[in-house]
Structures are given as structure tokens and as C-alpha cells.
Image (cartoon, rainbow, N blue to C red):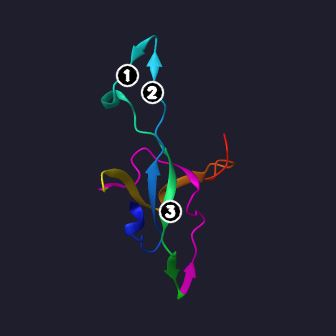
Amino acid sequence: MASKIKPLQDRVIVKRLEENEQMRGGLYIPDTAKEKPQEGEVIAAGPGKVENGNRIELTVKVGDKVLFGKYAGTEVKLDGEEYLIMREDDILGIIEGAAKGKGK
């Protein structure tokens, strides 16, 4: 699990949220043809960036559901799970009302 890695500065570890199986016109779309989701959950967050001797804390926190760019971050595989390590600047926004533990 990503808890074995502690991100530095303004980096976060995000796990992509998998979309449900897609069917178009009754045809199954294989995993290789699907686009990777651009939503994920923050699994770990760094302490923040230091500028002019002051630490600037991150806006996102563990458990936030976030939206990020299509090519954002660096993909890493840990214990068979895929994660993204990205800077907070790569995150486009926090999806409100979708925090961890809230029902659908």
C-alpha cells in the first residue's frame, strides 16, 4: 500500500478511481481501449512546500476525491496497486461532497 511511501514537499499520492464497465450499443469495451479515469482519491500528502522559510500547507488532504489532468503525475506500482505521484499544482480541483466515508 502507498502508506509505505511518504511524499515530500507539495507532492501527493493518488489512487485512480475506477469507472464502471462501459457498454456502448451492447458492445463490451476492453480495458485496453478505455481511457484512464481522471479522478482519484488522495492516499498520502506531503507536509507542504517551504518558501522564504515558511511552510505552505497543502490544500488537499488524505481522503479527498480530486480531479487531475489527463497526463498528470508519474505512475508507480506498489504491491501490485497502481498509484500516481503528483504535485498539488497538477490537481485541478477537489470534488465536493465526495470525501471518503460519505455515501453515494
User: Residue drawn 42% across and 66% down?
Assistant: 3
Q: Residue at x 30, y 56 (%)?
A: 79
- The quadrant in which the N terminus is found is bottom left
Q: How many marks?
A: 3
Report x, y in % for residue 44.
48, 64
State which quadrant residue 36 falls in.
Answer: top left
Q: Is residue 94 above or below residue 8?
A: above
Mark 1 vs mark 3: in front:
1
Residue matched to label 3: 88
Neighbourhood count class around disc 2 (C-alpha, 10 Å): few under 14, some 14–19, many 20 upward: few
Question: Whole-Å distance between the Cαs marked 2 and 1?
Answer: 8 Å
**Residue 47 in magenta stretch:** no
Q: Are marks 3 and 2 in contact (CB under 8 Å)?
A: no
Q: Which mark is residue 21?
A: 2
The span shown in magenta is 54-77
**Amino acid type, callout 3:** Glu
In the picture, residue 54 is in which quadrant? bottom right
